[in-house]
Amino acid sequence: MSPGIDISIIIPAYNEESRLRAGFDRLRPTLDVLDPQRLEVIVIDDGSNDKTMLHAHEVYGHLANTQFIQQPSNLGKGAAIKLGIAAARGEHLITADADMAIDPRHFPAFDVALGSSDVVPGSRAVNGRIRYDSLLRTYAGAAFNVIVRHYTKTEIRDTQCGCKGFRRGPARLLALLAMVDRFAFDAEMLYLAHRLGLRVEPLTVDWEDIKGSSVRVAHDSLEMLRDIRGLSRTAYENPVVVLERDVQGQSIVAPAREARLSGLVLARGPVDTLLVLPRDGSLGGLGVASVMGAQLRTARLEELEQRTYEAV
């Protein structure tokens, strides 16, 4: 990790050229509170067909630490966030929509909360319900959340809030395990956090229902329900390299780089440490295993529960 970066703000963006500037204006006061020298902003253009990436450079390019990543095609918000997590250098990560609809003044509170929690989902819910401008949307959102909580076994009242905080190690593991690339990604992350036994503590946030979102409520809700219903039937398995319990994370960096692997995490347990790889990372994992004198195999989700997680 590059020294000095404490917080990474991850911004997925799809056709957001018209909202990036206003989003930055909402973020600007918070940058005066958080030391910009110890913070990075990562903008992931998810295959936009407008000038999102050009505007991102214009809006955020003057900051001390920035990364701009462009997907070749529209793969989905979840895919963009996973890529941002893999690239993040801070120990605390905050995901935020391009319009900064969640008031960025909450970001320091996310940073503090991550001192004791692995995942800090922002929650727009008041008395258990998110209140939109439309009464119909408010009731539909409440009904949808009941369904989400049923299938994911989470008690979180606002799974779809675009602003969430993560510790980098657990975030890396969630990103490696997650299979959903589109809008049900948030719910899947919370489902996996529950399965892994991570510490999840919501943070109440203020927000504006800003117009211009690319979400297609009816179409995307149906797609999300389909994806969410399949979570409990999903066999979450990843290739892992089995290492000694006390292996030093720094010793993994060079072999992983040689194998062209990134975004990895060490899952430390009482008996061994598992280097968790992407699902398509078995070939590179063979190289790491050879260098480390270790074994490459597949691990189920259950084997990764109740461990400590360290980003490589």
Image (tube, rainbow, N blue to C red):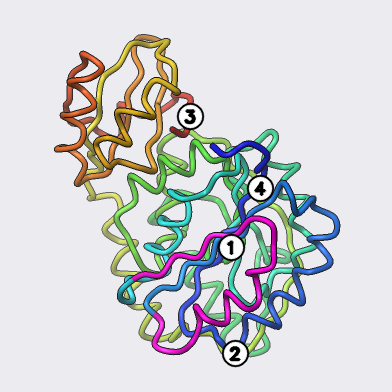
Looking at the image, is mark 4 or mark 2 earlier in the sequence?
Answer: 4
- Rate crowding at label 4 as few (under 14), some (14 to 19) or many (20 or more) other CA atoms within 10 Å: many
How far apart are the two marked residues, 3 and 4, measured between alpha carbons? 16 Å
Disc on res. 7: 4
Query: Which label's residue is closer to the chain start, 3 or 4?
Result: 4
In the image, is 52 to the left or to the right of 291?
A: right
Q: Specify whether residue 169 is painted magenta.
A: no
Disc 4 from disc 2: Cα separation: 26 Å
Left or right: residue 144 versus residue 107 is left
Q: In the rendered structure, which disc, 1 or 2, sits on the residue that comes first in sequence?
A: 2
Q: Position of residue 115 (x, y in %)?
A: 70, 35
Residue at mark 4 to residue at mark 1: CA–CA distance: 23 Å
Picture residue at 23% right of the left edge, 30% below the top = 299
Q: Amino acid at mark 3?
A: Glu
Distance from Cα at disc 2 to Cα at disc 3: 38 Å
Residue 116: x and y in percent read 68, 33
Label 2 with label 3: CB-CB less than 8 Å: no
In which quadrant will I find the N terminus? top right
Which is more foreground, mark 3 or mark 1? Answer: 3
Quarter containing the C terminus: top left
Query: Along the polypeptide, which appears first: circle 3 or circle 1?
Result: 1
Q: Where 94 sits versus 184, above or below?
A: above
Residue segment shown in magenta:
48-71
Q: Secondary structure at mark 3?
A: strand
Instruction: Name which residue lies at 50% across and 82% down.
Output: 52
- Marking on residue 18: 2
Q: Determine which residue is flagged by label 3.
A: 310
Q: First in sequence: mark 4 or mark 1?
A: 4
Please check the rendered image and state whether residue 52 is part of the magenta-colored stretch, yes or no: yes
User: Which mark, residue 158?
Assistant: 1
